[in-house]
Image: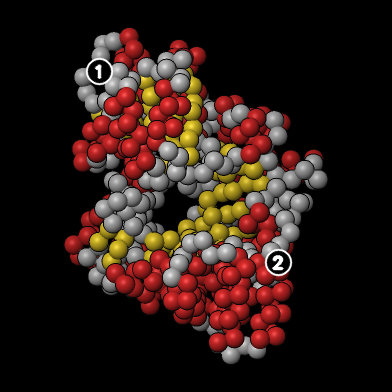
Amino acid sequence: MTILLSTLNARYTHASLGLRYLLANMGALKEQTRIQEFVIGAKTTELVERILAHDPKIVGFGVYIWNVEETAKLVAMLKRVAPHIVVVLGGPEVSHETGEQAIVQLADYVVTGWGDVTFPKLCGEILHGPKPLMKVHAGVQPPMADIALPYSLYSDEDIAHRTLYVEASRGCPFKCEFCLSALDKTAWPFNIDGFLAEMDALYARGARLFKFVDRTFNLNIKTSLKIMQFFLDKLAAHPDDPVYAHFELVPDHLPDALKEGIAKFPPGALQFEIGIQSFNPVVQANISRKQDNQKAADNIRWLCEHSHVHMHVDLIAGLPGETVESFAAGFDQLWALGPHEIQFGILKRLRGTPIIRHTQEFGLVFDPHPPYTILANRDIDFPTMQRLVRFARYWDLVANSGRFNHTIHALLGERPFDSFMAFSDWLYANTDATHRIALDRLAALVGRWLQQRGMGADEAAQLLARDGHGVRQKVTTTAAPQRQARHLAA
């Protein structure tokens, strides 16, 4: 084995699609290449030891916002104990602003952008000459038909225990300035028949949970319908062996043909992630986001009322021009539409994104360390931003978790954002913690809060009892992940 492909995943259940693409496209070097995945939080010395056990000549690391700091430590130690090993970096975190990154200085080479063609070529030059003179190599984007699909490289272990990431297209035609996809010119589809053949092979091997990473699943409706029909056919043929698919949707593009297909899916088969980000037209204009808010709201309402899709809708706090008051109005509007989860995100300054053009006008202040979260801006000072961060964390624990599906409505009342912000402030004052709050303790705290707001002790206890004090049996008739299954069971 000559070349090792590695990365530090956020969790064991995440399987790196990027590494598998690289391996699938290594050509003549494929037989000399292996994948070794790790998980963040492991001891650096142990990771170095496991890498050296392969005796590689080249190690390629996938670098992302969640693993860059630990990967930098890993690269530094690896180069100390085995300086002869050539280290090549790739991934979104090192594809922009390379000149100012410590991890780039530690490595031998960097591939920016698409690595399918450029990484194998670079490895060939390192091994066989002529030796590459440049440190940074801009990734060449090949025709989509020339990219070998990686799905056969998911192992039986991956299929049995990990999330399988798949993509029917790459790129995005929209220009939202907080997103790296703003740098794409368009979206590029893979051949749909070849892609579905790969999905069929995964299904035949036992895969039942498919997470699509396409930014715009519903951009091409004909393709969307073909993909949905693939899953509908599997459900019809084997209703007692369900599949589960996750898609990211453009919120204001849901024609009738797509609605008809969506309505055919049973409970526990589909999840849609929909990025609203902000309902404020001024903020949308600031970040170059084109969105018909009325159509988006109507489509979310339709999905909630007329389909069995698990709905996960995103909002981002801290965008330029968004005040707490306008964000609260958008939050309340979204809650009224009825999605199962509102993903309350805090703005991050991803390397290379155009959001930095607003830094001076809107006083954007970001944490210099990953994940580069906004700390304050012109409209939201640092203490208030920290309150929003805690709100987001507690919201995930209480509302999004599915463990308080009945209680949450009493908790929010008629002013959801204000009510939960008050609860969040109280919860922090009484726990001084945002993590590691045991479920039983959290349920007791929710009950105390409801009583302080005027609810009788018996009524609060009965309400929490309906949620089993946060404990629900896993729904076994669906392939959906457990958190989504709890919403389904409510």
Q: Quadrant of residue 376?
A: bottom left
- Residue 183: percent from left, percent from top: 33, 44
Amino acid under label 2? Ala
Residue, disc 1: 132
- Residue 355: percent from left, percent from top: 28, 55
Mark 1 element type: loop
Q: Nearer the viewer, residue 346 or 250?
A: 346
Residue, disc 2: 490
User: Seen in the image, is 92 located left or right of residue 445?
Assistant: left
Find residue 58 and name its label: none
Which residue is at 63% across, 39% downward? 161
Q: Quadrant of residue 358?
A: bottom left
| Vertical comparison of 379 with 104: above or below | below
Which residue is at 47% across, 72% downward? 431
| Vertical comparison of 146 with 413: above or below | above
- Residue 8: percent from left, percent from top: 44, 38
Query: Which label's residue is closer to the chain start, 2 or 1?
Result: 1
User: Seen in the image, is 476 located left or right of residue 170?
Assistant: right
Question: Residue most toward the top?
Answer: 128
Q: Nearer the viewer, residue 488 or 142?
A: 488
User: Seen in the image, is 301 located left or right of residue 215?
Assistant: right
Amino acid under label 1? Pro
Residue 184 visible in image: no
- Residue 404: percent from left, percent from top: 63, 70
Q: CA distance from mark 2 to mark 1?
A: 59 Å
Mark 2 element type: loop
Which residue is at 26% across, 34% downward? 104
- Callout 1: 10 Å neighbours few (<14), some, many (20+)? some
